[in-house]
Image: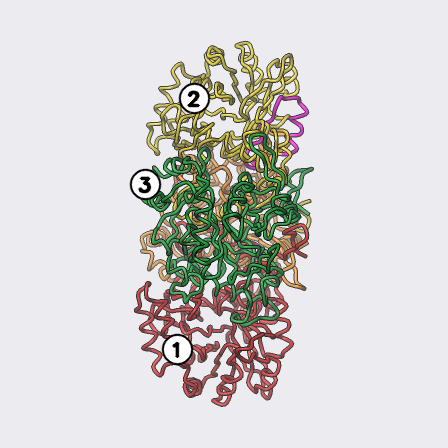
Chain colours: A orange, B yellow, C green, D red
Amino acid sequence: MGMWIGRNRKARVTYGFDEIALVPGRVTINPNEVDITFRLPRKAAEPLELKIPILASAMDGVVDVGFAIAMNKLGGLAVLNLEGVQTRYKNPQEVLQKIVEASKSEITALLQRIYQEPIQQDLIAARVRQIKDAGVVAAVSSIPQRAAEFGRIAQEADADVFVVQSTVSTVRHISSEYKSLDLEKFCREMRIPVIVGNTVGYDVTLEIMECGPAAVLVGVGPGAACTSRGVLGLGVPQVTATVDCAAARDAYFKKTSRMATPHANLPRGTRIKVGATGSLKQILFGPAEVDDGSQNLVGAITTCMGNVGARNLPEFQQTEIIIAPSIRTEGKLFQTVQSVGMGTS
Amino acid sequence: MGMWIGRNRKARVTYGFDEIALVPGRVTINPNEVDITFRLPRKAAEPLELKIPILASAMDGVVDVGFAIAMNKLGGLAVLNLEGVQTRYKNPQEVLQKIVEASKSEITALLQRIYQEPIQQDLIAARVRQIKDAGVVAAVSSIPQRAAEFGRIAQEADADVFVVQSTVSTVRHISSEYKSLDLEKFCREMRIPVIVGNTVGYDVTLEIMECGPAAVLVGVGPGAACTSRGVLGLGVPQVTATVDCAAARDAYFKKTSRMATPHANLPRGTRIKVGATGSLKQILFGPAEVDDGSQNLVGAITTCMGNVGARNLPEFQQTEIIIAPSIRTEGKLFQTVQSVGMGTS
Amino acid sequence: MGMWIGRNRKARVTYGFDEIALVPGRVTINPNEVDITFRLPRKAAEPLELKIPILASAMDGVVDVGFAIAMNKLGGLAVLNLEGVQTRYKNPQEVLQKIVEASKSEITALLQRIYQEPIQQDLIAARVRQIKDAGVVAAVSSIPQRAAEFGRIAQEADADVFVVQSTVSTVRHISSEYKSLDLEKFCREMRIPVIVGNTVGYDVTLEIMECGPAAVLVGVGPGAACTSRGVLGLGVPQVTATVDCAAARDAYFKKTSRMATPHANLPRGTRIKVGATGSLKQILFGPAEVDDGSQNLVGAITTCMGNVGARNLPEFQQTEIIIAPSIRTEGKLFQTVQSVGMGTS
Amino acid sequence: MGMWIGRNRKARVTYGFDEIALVPGRVTINPNEVDITFRLPRKAAEPLELKIPILASAMDGVVDVGFAIAMNKLGGLAVLNLEGVQTRYKNPQEVLQKIVEASKSEITALLQRIYQEPIQQDLIAARVRQIKDAGVVAAVSSIPQRAAEFGRIAQEADADVFVVQSTVSTVRHISSEYKSLDLEKFCREMRIPVIVGNTVGYDVTLEIMECGPAAVLVGVGPGAACTSRGVLGLGVPQVTATVDCAAARDAYFKKTSRMATPHANLPRGTRIKVGATGSLKQILFGPAEVDDGSQNLVGAITTCMGNVGARNLPEFQQTEIIIAPSIRTEGKLFQTVQSVGMGTS
């Protein structure tokens, strides 16, 4: 297991989502008849059922209260970031607008300034209640260091799901500056389901699962560069899906610019244009009016499940994976050259 | 067999046509002396002989009645799609013209509208007879769900070959909305040769072959994204050949735009420009007037067979394959930079 | 040995020159002190010594009489193609000029027309004598089918080396249209050294070596697409060197366009611009005035030999090879973006 | 160990820095609490401690006296090249200015002319003293052939570190033109720490370490093409860090063009634009005002160490490495297309 990279040192070979593919099934299924319900286990209740297994990332550029309500009504789960503009500003809409309008040269400094404003604890409960008042489930998130405190506030405000979010999550984190999260204790004491993400290492994921969360998000990328992407417990490639959630949100707000993960001292995130191509409902359920894969995400999932012969999500997770680097370009010559269809990206 | 992709999960490595090559033979053959006849077995007759082993894809953008007649006269086999514009419209030429003229922004919606028109059963027999009246063989196709019905109509109209076409073909397909095709029964009951395609999975192909079709098409790409490409039972890379069939058809009709696989709800196909460079005969047999490989497809096949030392197609199928990713770029620096010769693509 | 490409079929993995590298030696040598003399064994004489191990390809775009004289005086070996314009036209210079001036759309047809003119046997001897009269060695080539006849004429005209040239050389070639070359008999009967090239398959090369040629050229590319490139018996990557021979020749004639391998029916060759950057002497021996590796080829070879610790060519051939795909881009970010130095290609 | 590249020849597979990644730790650490002190052993004194493990390459385009003082005050180690313009010219600033202003077509010839000026021995001691007079450590370098002589002069002038610099360093070098360096003897006799670099071969590195240097620089690239890049003994990928040192120096001097390794006869180096984005302090310690990774190098190192769970540099060197070619593009679609953030390169 591993290739030699020196006379006495081996390295495992790892693969990205772009390099793998799912093996077509020996049995196929009519896509209209596959079951894509996602069930999130709860402690003192029936599982929380999501009609569609699509999670909107807890990024300021993706989820705010209005989007969370719209998304959750349609059967998905939008996670509101408790450490972003929503809890730092009474009127986050104004702040987002400034970000959209900033020029390329001033955007990094602006983002840093915006995120120096302190989090207002009363806004945490307020945001949860705004979502709940619409009659839908509410999911919120924070990084591990604040999970104990923010998780308690969110739970008291009647949130349905709490996400412990981290670029690289580990069960054990060493720090003398702040108190590390005791994940096992946190999962045991929270009454609502805890989701942990985005894990990127195999061993870390196993250790996290032993702490008893309701689900684990599998992130993209083998190291520190990975960002808040992943799909609710699927364990299969869904990059397109989560990318398009940003597009969906974009469609909702009719804006054209968003940011990822700003950081005062070492910015790794940046503002990107997503460019939504239709309404949120159309992006999720179609009918697609464009041919680039950015609409009808649910149709894409059910077609894929039909092709691989998976009747439901647990079966989908068991699909055989192949390593197939050429799948990115194979048979797409005309599309790529002419920038149409799947050749656009 | 397979690489580790996690502590307890393996994945096979797979390769695309762009990544493999055929090994030059220890014996070479004068290309003028190789035999490229393809023989399709028939139940109550001698095999159907095709002078050249080139199949024109059953796509609306490639095959109509006129093209089928021209192609089959030249020794190949053009397959007419029974679910496209040819059987939905009395005058498909008008419809194709609209597609050619549509702007980039309206093309997806137009394609969806065009394919909502119902199939007219009397047009199926009519198209077969139009081809037969020219004194050539007629090959038609449908997806599995309609094969039982359309196969019977085509056979009664005196078609010579029926193609069961599917993005991902499996012997077993689960659906309660419609009746799945019993492929074994279908192959047993049809009097004319049945070709099944485009298979992409190895296991599926083996199961299909046990159902008794006359031939199986091997498609491009390991998953759901693969489209109707492949070459009649060769089992060797022929991507260029099938791409150029679209160019050939284009040359025939003097049009410049075609579409692939439109779908009302989840379009994966799109309209692409092919741009023919010569007459159909020239594209198939040369002499080539251009140096980009889009003319004299038969010359390309015989030269390749001569180089690998294959005297006929069964021997060609046994050629040793090597995995050679660098073959795409090796020694093509000048051509690529200057967009001449094989460096164009 | 090999990767599985199907449940019961394996394929060997092969590598291109761009994917491999030579391992730096544990001992290094002052480049000024390595010996690059190439010795070509002769039957009834001392070996033919070449001061520099660089062969100019037998292509009409590279070698004519004047270039052969200039190149061979400088210590290399330029091979004149006996089937190109030099033996079809009394005044080949005129013909080359037409090729240079033709537009992109007419070039393929023009090349085909030019190569339909028959070869004039008296010009074969004339060209050899023109080179010999300058007091340098003369090397000429033909494809296998004509080697018996042209080899005899060239030898009688006092040529020093005969090259049997072929896209894919094999010892055994099957044809009823023409007589195949009996390579073993040919090598035994020729008095002057016979070089065979360009071989691309390992087994074929072994079989050819058993026929007793003086040297074998190792070509680029694993299949039929490989062209007349290779370096005299080195067995190590020399792509840059042969490419630059075209540049060298270009410098000599002050022209800017050349063609590769035209073919009446299936053109795979094409006309490319090479663009020489200095005089032939400067290209071979420096001093280099540019930083893109196109000048001072001998300096590049001796520096490389010094770094890997090879004192002479036989030792150079034994250098350990590594597979290192990243060598093409590693550490060249700035150069590539700014199109300077080795980042240009 | 190795892949077959012929029937009786194997080749090891090697990887570039772009193809590997560090495995996230099962334990993570607060980045503010990792220790990045680098300790360089000395013979008759406590180890020389560097606050930050960043080395500025001994290239004329990177280090001069002023930059060395500024860099070393900030805790890093800038190495002054004793064979560049600093020791050939009393006023090197003028010369650098000419290089900056030269046009693209004249730059190679200009560089060759500049480096034909002889080295003035008195300038070696003068440069060392200029640096020492500022109260910081002084590090200088030469190629092996001149190390014995220049090392002695530098040591007498009170330099703190001597770097034996070579494209491909070996313990044994064969030459009759000049005296090869006896590295073991040199390391034994020098009183100040000797660093050897840039080694690229594993076996060579082991042999060099047995000669007793204080540290070995690990270079980029498996062959002769590698240039003066590497990070002080870390043994982990730090390409970005060293590239950015050039940017740092650029910021210091407010210039926009630099050159790499000019050579009179075979130029492999070239002049590149680096384009600094901030002050040297900002580049090293932040706060970063841009999002492309070119600022706050120390923050990048500590964040990485925190993520992989390394408390100090010796632990960092033991981090598990994975081979992960897709890490270059994975999840960076939007950034790449829009040229923002890490997608810029």
> Neighbour class for label 3 at 10 Å: few (<14), some, many (≥20)?
few
Position of the C terminus of chain D, as image quadrant, is: bottom left
Q: In this picture, which residue range is highlighted in magenta? A: B202-224
Nearer the camera: disc 1 or disc 2? 1
Q: Secondary structure at mark 2?
A: loop
Whether residue C343 is visible here, answered yes or no, is yes
Give the chain letter at badge 1: D
Q: Nearer the viewer, mark 2 or mark 3?
A: 3
Residue B216 among those drawn in magenta: yes
Q: Which residue is mark 3?
A: C103
- Is disc 3 placed on a helix, strand or loop? loop
Task: Reply above or below: D254 against B88.
Answer: below
Residue A122: give x, y in percent of width and height.
44, 56
Q: Which residue is mark 1?
A: D85
The answer, for residue A317, to whether it is visible in the render is no
Query: Which amino acid does the dot numbered 2 rest on?
Result: Gln
Q: Residue under label 2, please give it.
A: B116
Label 2 is found on which chain of the structure? B
Instruction: Decide whether residue D146 is among the magenta residues.
Output: no
Identity, as a three-letter code, of the amino acid under mark 1: Val
Q: CA distance from mark 2 to mark 3?
A: 48 Å
Depicted D255 relative to depicted B345: above or below: below
Looking at the image, which residue is at 66% across and 21% down?
B212
Q: Quadrant of residue A3?
A: bottom right
- x and y percentages locating residue B74 in the rendered image: 48, 21
Label 2 close to label 3 by CB (< 8 Å): no
Horizontally, is D149 left or right of A171 in the view?
left
B40 or A143: nearer the eye?
B40
Amino acid of disc 3: Ser
Residue closest to the eye, A226 or B304: B304
